[in-house]
Image (cartoon, helix red, strand yellow):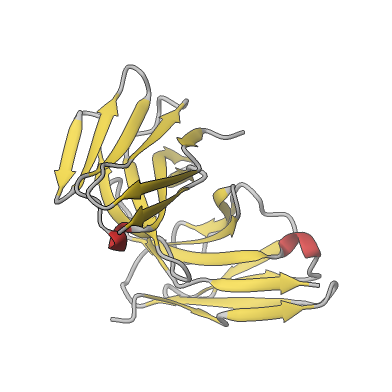
Amino acid sequence: NAGVTQTPKFQVLKTGQSMTLQCAQDMNHNSMYWYRQDPGMGLRLIYYSASEGTTDKGEVPNGYNVSRLNKREFSLRLESAAPSQTSVYFCASRLAGVWNEQFFGPGTRLTVL
Amino acid sequence: QQQVKQSPQSLIVQKGGIPIINCAYENTAFDYFPWYQQFPGKGPALLIAIRPDVSEKKEGRFTISFNKSAKQFSLHIMDSQPGDSATYFCAASAVSGGYQKVTFGTGTKLQVIP
């Protein structure tokens, strides 16, 4: 099992450019998440998908959109990148249930100039 | 609004020492308290977790102490090793809007000196 995979690993964008971050999991998990990690701020939830076909906003959704393509894949799109979106982005997944852990991908380091 | 407060921000201990990382929460609806370990360039990985009906949980050299009345919990690392050098995040989760929402602390960067 590959677990949670993310592409790309690194990306540099110019202000106003768009891009999609890809995430896939092979653990048959119901729920998937996108977080951003910034120094001194921990992990903040951008969007989540409790199950295939549903998506909801998290703590910091402005400037982002998501698509739950199927049970395996959950993508994050930046329509018009801004320097404030420079961050490390993590995708995570988990099986439904109170005590189940979240599994994280390796992250995408995004720089917006 | 920071619902899970974590301290210290960074910590340096010598090999064999016992680093302690503290977290406090506000929301009494939280019902699961995991700790994650993150190495540079990697995603966080679950280290150990505790439920609020238990006051202590040990897994190897890692121990969580939980004080429900004070709304505080802490991570102790016994006989710390240089390989334990990483960033540690506490977290708390509760069902919100029909899904399990996890709130993370701001992280503690631990360095264990040989």
Q: Is residue A21 left or right of residue A3?
A: right
Residue B43 appears in which quarter of the rendering?
bottom left
Task: Give residue B35's position: percent from left, percent from top.
Answer: 34, 47
Give me the residue at 39% from left, 58% from top.
Answer: B86
Which quarter of the rendered picture does the N terminus of chain B lie within?
Answer: top right
Residue A103 appears in which quarter of the rendering?
bottom left
Task: Give residue A29's position: percent from left, percent from top.
Answer: 35, 66
Residue A95 in view here: yes
Q: Is residue A111 left or right of residue B75?
A: right
Q: Residue furthest top?
A: B69
Residues A91 and A42: in front is A42
Q: Residue furthest right?
A: A16
Task: Give residue A41's position: percent from left, percent from top.
Answer: 59, 47
Residue A100 in view here: no
Task: Give residue A20's position: percent from left, percent from top.
Answer: 65, 77
Residues B114 and B97: in front is B114
Give me the residue at 21% from left, 28% from top.
Answer: B53
Give me the residue at 40% from left, 39% from top.
Answer: B92
Residue B64 appears in which quarter of the rendering?
top left
**Tally of numbered discs:** 0
Which quarter of the rendered picture does the C terminus of chain B lie within?
Answer: bottom left
Residues A3 and A108: in front is A108
